[in-house]
Amino acid sequence: MKALSLLLLTFLLTRSARAQFWIVSDKDGFVNVRDSANTRSRVKDTLYNGHFIFVFRFEEQVGSWMKIEYSHHGKDREGYVYHDRLIPIAHYDSIPLRKSSDNIATYSRDSVRVIVTQQKFDKTKHRLTFADAGSAQLVEIDGEQYLGTDGEVPKREYKSIEIFVGNRRISLPRAAFANLFEPTIYNTEIRYNRAEDIFYIHAENSDGAGAYDVIWRIVKGVYTDRDIELDF
């Protein structure tokens, strides 16, 4: 019990200082991204409702404007948007961590239960590409750039994420975990928009060097998309 309490305290302290995902939510259905924090600056992009954006620190707010980072058309971008055009993922109901072991973390509240599991990284089930013959510098896993380590072979990978809502069971597909390694399964934020039946699962993962944030969205029982932001 003491170990779990310490784990939860560490988790909460980390959560209070970490970056957060938000989503675009505007009555017009879209928001303009500007170069600077004023309406006279150039509109550099347009994001539609539901688009994920990322805020590293709340201090990035400039008056009524929020400095954001986001991905659009395959590129990482940044700019300013009016803060009341956004909703933080933290606005929705939290499904808290209840118990955790080395490989399983269980989050639950009322009739909702989310189980996040990990397993050892099995090199025999992946195609590893190194910088050159004899090199220990890993550059690709299964033909893709990977996240979680900085050039080293991962030690852990996701096994599954399952959501239970009453008698309903939702399993995220393997594609949801592609190129994501070194999960910190107890450092996962589960949020549930009950009104629209949307789950947001946000994890901050790293082996100490290859830090990244990932958020998955599950709408009405169906996994729809994910967004990934690198931590520098």
Image (cartoon, rainbow, N blue to C red):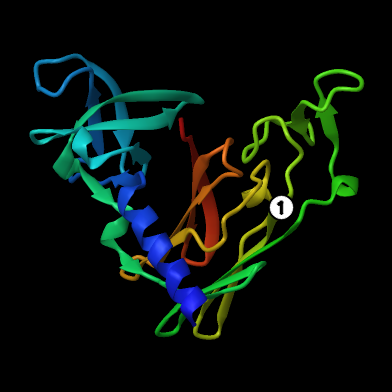
Q: Is residue 33 left or right of residue 171?
A: left
Q: In the visual, does 49 lie left or right of 127?
A: left
User: x%, y% of residue 187?
Assistant: 49, 59
Toward the viewer: 74 or 66? 66
When asked about the image quadrant of residue 37, the answer is: top left
Frontmost residue, 97 versus 29: 97
How would you rate the neighbour count of disc 1 (Cα within 10 Å): few for under 14, some for 14-19, many for 20 or more? some
Residue 63 location in percent, x, y?
8, 33
Say if 201 sits above or below 51 in the image: below
Residue 10 is at least partly visible in this image:
yes
Q: Position of residue 14 (x, y in %)?
A: 38, 54
Q: Pointer 1: what residue?
A: 156
Q: Is residue 98 visible?
A: no
**Residue under the image location 49 percent in, 75 percent down:** 4
The amino acid at mark 1 is Arg
The structure residue drawn at horizontal position 20% and vertical position 37%, both measured from the top left corner, is: 59
Residue 196 is situated, as x and y percent measured from the top left of the image, at 35, 65
Label tally = 1
Label 1 residue SS: strand
In this picture, is 79 found above or below 120? above
- Residue pushed farthest front? 2
User: Could you tell whether 76 is left or right of 182 in the image?
Assistant: left
Residue at screen point 57% across, 61% down: 185
